[in-house]
Image (cartoon, coloured by chain):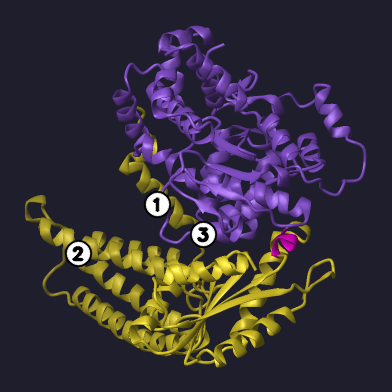
Chain colours: A yellow, B purple
Amino acid sequence: MTVSLRSFPALRWRRGLQQLARLDYAPVLGLRRFGHGLLLVAAGLALLFALTGQPRPLASWHGMDLLSEGGLCGLLALWLAQLRSSRPPGPVSNRLFLGLAAWLLGAWVDLLDEFWLLPKAWWWDNALESGLTLAGIVLLTWGLQGWRQEQLALNEQLRRRERDWRDHRRLDPVTRLADAVYMSQCVSQQLQRAEPAWLLMLGFEAFEQVLREAGLAEAEALLDSAARLLCLNLGRQDLVCRYAGDRFVLLLPGLDETSGPALERTLAQALAALSHADAQGRRWQLAVRSSGLALPAPGQPEELMLELARRLASA
Amino acid sequence: MTELAAALQALGLPPPPAASYGREQAVLNWCDQGALLAEFARQRGLVIEHWLQDAGVQPGGLLSPAQLLALLAPLLRLGADAPFVLGQLWWPGHYGLASQALRQSAHVLQAAERLARRAGRLSPLLTPRVLRQEGRLWLLFTEACGLPAAQRAALVDLHLAAFVGFCHWRGGQRLPWRAHFNRSRPRDPGAQLVWLGPELQFDCQVDALSLPLDCARKPWAAEGGAELALAALEAGADAQALRRGWLAGLSEQLLAQLCAGAPSLETLARSQGVSPATLKRQLAAQGTHYQAELDQLRALVAAALMKLHGWSPERVGAALGFGDASNFRKSFRRWTGLSPRAWA
């Protein structure tokens, strides 16, 4: 039996650190090297303790304190790295970053206490510890309040692309729509509500030709344009997801056997009118096929969508 | 010639022996499949240096199948449609003379035959095999030199989508393909349906495409120019194109020996000119072992004989060297999870 080197946890750790080092970190207050600055301040504090304090004898080290305070420092540093590598710079980001950084330094001073004894008469280490932690938590709270408002604004932008809940694993990287699994969850909720709705699938006639003749980049740009065009044509309660390939699946609540097909025709015409210009200046305008069914309908959501895909494939 | 050998020959098996390449052997040009993958990785926003570094690959030069698989692994995880989109770019591809010859095929059947013959260049990871039976063309995809289990399904999807897509593009129309999968039905086979067509069959013993032969022989519009690429290939250009994956070559030898009676590891090793211990080690390096290969092959042959030739389970059992029918039934159930009756 062969054992892969990668199965050793120690090597996976190294890989994790390598991944962390590859990330792109947002600047804080315009400072790109904020992390290095933070390290420098932490080292300065450690030096201050080493120069002014009495090393604590090994016998009076508290294992539990070291573990909890060291762990808190480590986790705060990780949170800061995660946040900086995922958020764009801006006022809200700055508050969050600075809050976490101040809290981290407070925790660091707390940790240094465990290694060096300072004379009881000195007050600055306690002030530093409490002040930094308090400032950090206040900044973080202020930042989270901003984050909430920012998120509400973003939710409004994402309307028609998501409904009721969010799952980033279900996002399609090309069109930035949710995928078929997300749609099937929404359809099953719709089925539970037992209200009328129209489930619709749209697809291009000769998409593969674009892929081969204009290339992958153009084909994906075409899909992205199509997704945006569909979003423009939808109401607030509607949802569009990417099914697979060049197929889009739409859930239109409140429509019935007569209004559903009418909107279906309108959407298919809108998509067929899309004329995508590629980098060579060639225009691609593809015929569109559509197929829809009224909800509630018997069957699992996946089967309903599969039925629509089958109708589209054999149309 | 035994009855079994005659039946297999009627199926077009086994093909003539060919030189082989192993999983770690650097035989593929970077600018063939490697460059294609790099383009896809760039389009999907991967950092190319990191992607290459993780796969342990230097661009340029030659790639081994193992490196190609390592390059593919992160790409196949980029969205549910990644294998199918890669498939659209896979054939005819820009792999030199072999691609040109594939492109100049006159119809589906000829394309399948050219693909199977030049698999070393066109399809280095899964070896295509062409069968003609019951008025249908079958294009089977078998492992060339071992695949990681996690990538298997996606790679099969990629290859099936590649051939369906190539024929659609070359012939200008959708064909009534039937796609067969050697795996159970996924919860939502939507992507397979969209890219491969509405006829999907899961829980088959093979990964294959099939098409009525009259569709497969329908001529395509001629591609301009003389068939210079094919002539050059026939004259011996591009030796790699003719080579087969080590595992594919081995199962061909095993198949030939299967006709002569129950083969053993020792006889197979002797015919390869290596010691049994070396053969075992080589098989382990491809992530498999002798009994697994033998079982897989016997399952395939039994399934084909029953389904395509209409043989009874008793007859198949006897031809494969099983003493009695119940023994064969038990083995078939172990290989495939199905009873022979249920399969036939």
Is disc 3 in contact with disc 1, using a CB cutoff of under 8 Å? no
Residue indicated by mark 2: A69
Q: Nearer the viewer, mark 3 or mark 1?
A: 3
Prevalent SS, magenta region: helix
Residue B38 in sight here: no
Q: Do circles 2 and 3 both sit on a common chain?
A: no
Residue A208: say if magenta: yes
Helix, strand or loop status at disc 1:
helix
Q: Which residues are magenta?
A: A207-211
Give the residue displayed 49% in from the left and 6% down from the top: B270
Ranked by sequence position, the earlier of labels 2 and 1 is 1
Q: Quadrant of the N terminus of chain B?
A: top right
The label on residue A16 is 1
Give the residue displayed 42% in from the left and 55% down from the top: B186
Residue B2 in sight here: yes
Helix, strand or loop status at disc 3:
loop
